[in-house]
Image: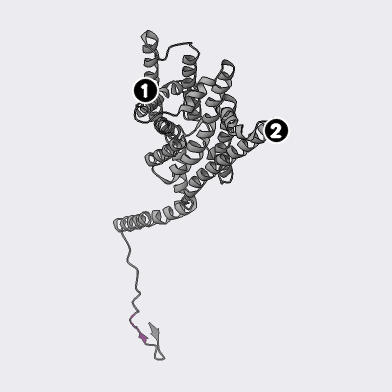
Amino acid sequence: MYSNSNDTTICLPAPKVEREPVLDDREWQSAVADLVEYEKSADPLVTERVVESSSRPAKVVPRVWTVFLSLVLAIVAIVVTQIALAVVLAVWLTAKGVASQDLQERLMEIVGGPAGFIGFGLAAQLAIGLAAVVPAALSRRPLLQRVGLVGAKLPSWGFPVVMIGSLLPASLGILAAVQLARVLPADSSVAALYENLTLGWAIPFVLFISLAPGLMEELLFRGYLQTRLLERWKPGFAIVVSSSLFALFHITPHGIALAFIAGLFLGVLAWRTGSIWPGVLCHAFINGSVNVLRLGVRFGAWSGSLTGVAGIVMTGLVVVCFAVTLWLMIKAPSSSTRRRSPANEFATRMHLGLARA
């Protein structure tokens, strides 16, 4: 509206102003709900990717060839040490005035005796232990953790129970070896060794046959070897492979039969408890008890078979302890079992909530 020179008022139509539509309460709440649903559907995808990329390291496939290389090196080290000891012994006998034609006979006599058996056996066991410790020391993981020398998932009272219970699989292995002896003759050198043992050599012999293989062989076969195989293969297959290799190291068919059955038990025990310490104690206890029984028969301390009340009590004790051992192994969580405490679960949820915020 404006006035001209004639003082006449002219009215013009006012332009239409476009106004945004006003949403009522229902439409506003619906729009907000749609926005919230969109954020909920889109945000977790981004959040999970961020959390996974930041908290999950890249999966590294463990190498298996190092296991078999360590076994080859162990065999080479054993052969080299045995030859070196034989050469040193031959030089010493020659210096003592033994004639060359009698040298081989004297060497076999010493090696077949208790002193030679312990000396050559100790060198072989040290080679087996080094075959486990050296490659484990080159690993990125701590040495004790790499070879399984860590705390076992067993109560303190479980260790003697497991040791006594281990006599059941050992007895099954001995039974298999006895049945095999009906088809294949046993090694006569073992019987000759027991005949040459005196009461003075019996104690160092039992200590050696218990402690050295109990520690060194468990370090290699259940510690370094089986631990690596469990990282790559399924537990059942890894334990069978490690037990088979352990058995083959015992060379004779009778020793292989005994070692394979006992090795299966020791392998499962190490896997379920997360440590080789129970297996070390069981291995030493099996070797020690079997040889103590044989030496007791050798020196006439007791008969060759357990009969009567004593036999029934000992057999029942072994069976009960083995049953408790199975319960302890089933109860113990394996290394692949995930367990989350309430605190860890709460921390995980808080982490996700902060990531979304």
Q: Residue at x 36, y 22 (%)?
A: 323
The residue lying toward the viewer, choosing from 33 and 144, is 144
The residue lying toward the viewer, choosing from 330 and 353, is 330
Please give the range of residues in magenta.
Answer: 8-13
The residue lying toward the viewer, choosing from 228 and 50, is 228
Query: Is residue 41 shown above or below 342?
Result: below
The CA distance from mark 1 to mark 2 is: 58 Å
Kindly identify which residue carries mark 1: 323
User: Few, some or many C-alpha atoms within 10 Å of disc 2 (few <14, some 14-19, many ≥20)?
Assistant: few
Percent across and percent down for residue 80 are 58, 41
Identify which amino acid the numbered label 1 is placed on: Ala
207 to the left or right of 46: right
User: Few, some or many C-alpha atoms within 10 Å of disc 1 (few <14, some 14-19, many ≥20)?
Assistant: some
Farthest residue to the right: give it.
95
Q: Residue at x 40, y 20 (%)?
A: 321
Q: Is residue 63 shown to the viewer in this render?
A: no
Farthest residue to the top: give it.
309
Confirm whether the magenta stretch covers residue 12: yes
SS class, disc 2: helix
Q: Where, by quadrant of the figure, is residue 332 drawn?
A: top left
Confirm whether the magenta stretch covers residue 236: no
Who comes first in sequence, dot 1 or dot 2?
2
Identify which amino acid the numbered label 2 is placed on: Ala
Kindly identify which residue carries mark 2: 95
